[in-house]
Amino acid sequence: MIRKLAYILITLGIILVVASQMHSDSDIINWGSYSEALKFAKKDNKLIFVYFYSDNCPYCKSMSSKVFSDERIAGILNEKFTPVKVNVRVDSDLVKKFVSSFKEKNMDFVTPSYIIIDSNERIIDMKVGYLEKSEFEKFIMNVNK
């Protein structure tokens, strides 16, 4: 009985330690709505970073756990941009608004996808697919208004 209780306590301890060390991108990135982002971008003179994702997309989950959970990446997104996270299955109107932009650049709209726009909704840059942390950082750091 004592051995079983000790096993349970050790298992719970390990789970708590691992869970406390894991970050979710929602914890450290100030995601907002698209309409809010337009207002803040104009007021703060920032670009808008739009991240298109789907709940059932394994690459989106990897972006959350490996890239957006990184404190350096989150800091850049929060400081340099007004970040917006768009669930493609929920906000289809916003998806429709930008799908043609991908087609114009001969890019398929897939999840994850990323668009950087200015406060007048002019597209500055865009990418699709999973990006390694270093590649993603280059993408967001090399943006010019």
Image (cartoon, rainbow, N blue to C red):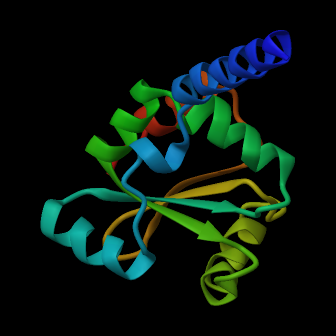
Given the current orientation, which residue lies at the most extreme bottom position?
A: 93
Residue depicted at 34% across the width and 51% down the height: 81
| Residue 142: image location, x then y, percent | 44, 34
Given the current orientation, which residue lies at the most extreme left position?
A: 43
Query: Is 80 positioned to the left or the right of 25 in the image?
Result: left
Taking 50 as reference, is 36 above or below it? below
* Quadrant including the N terminus: top right
Could you tell me if residue 129 is visible in this image?
Answer: no
Query: Is 60 positioned to the left or the right of 56 in the image?
Result: left
Residue 108, picture quadrant? bottom right
Front in this rendered view, residue 15 or 70: 15
Residue 57, picture quadrant? bottom right
Taking 142 as reference, is 89 above or below it? below
Q: How many marks?
A: 0
Front in this rendered view, residue 130 or 69: 69
Could you tell me if residue 11 is visible in this image?
Answer: yes
Front in this rendered view, residue 68 or 41: 68
Front in this rendered view, residue 141 or 7: 7
Residue depicted at 72% across the width and 61% down the height: 105
Residue depicted at 36% across the width and 35% down the height: 76
Taking 81 as reference, is 95 above or below it? below
| Residue 130: image location, x then y, percent | 76, 40
| Residue 87: image location, x then y, percent | 66, 71
